[in-house]
Amino acid sequence: MIKSKNSSYKQYSVTAVVTAALGVSQPALYGIAIPYKRVMVASIIGGLAGGFYAGLKEFYSCAFVNPGIAALPALISPDGSFGNLINGILVMVFAFGVSFLIILFGKFKDMPDAEIAEIVGEEEN
């Protein structure tokens, strides 16, 4: 979380976001979204924004793949045009961007250090 005052949780959050962008969402889900309910709501609203744009542009995937940046080649149309790929990138930008802005400007309270230590795998002394 960019608004957290705990540096180890910030490092964990960056790692979780990168892995989520590559298609593995469990660290972000269990370490960020579930403990912070507002983050979960922001993610749902971001997904709604991306899905709305996808519906307007009739976006589709040409293969069954896990979602994420690594799946971009599956968005190239069978005829070789890149219009669907560009729409796919814009869908991701909308989804991530809307979620990020809601989290950035929303109200946020840090968790207690003991809970953060449990999430990031640190032991208390």
Image (cartoon, rainbow, N blue to C red):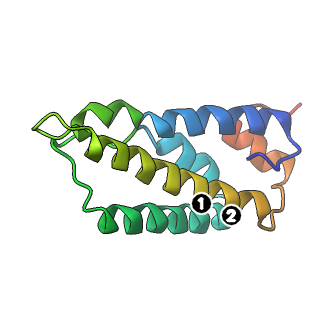
Looking at the rendered structure, the secondary structure element under dot 2 is helix
Query: Residue 113: where, in percent of width, then height?
Result: 85, 46
- Neighbours of disc 1 within 10 Å: few (<14), some (14-19), many (20+): many
Residue indicated by mark 1:
98
Q: Nearer the viewer, residue 115 or 39?
A: 39
User: Badges 2 and 1: C-beta atoms under 8 Å apart?
Assistant: yes
Position of the C terminus by quadrant: top right
| Residue at (60% x, 58% y) in the render | 99
In this picture, residue 22 sits left or right of residue 4: left
Q: Residue at x 35, y 47 (%)?
A: 88
| Residue lying at the far left of the rendered structure | 79
Q: In the rendering, at what x and y percent does residue 39 appear?
A: 64, 61
Please tell me which residue is depicted at 46% across the width and 43% down the height of the picture.
Answer: 25
Q: Is residue 102 visible?
A: yes
Q: Position of residue 10 (x, y in %)?
A: 76, 38
Side of 19 relative to 83 (left or right): right
Residue at mark 2: 102
Type of amino acid at the residue the image marks with label 2: Ile
**Which of these two is toward me, 87 or 123?**
87
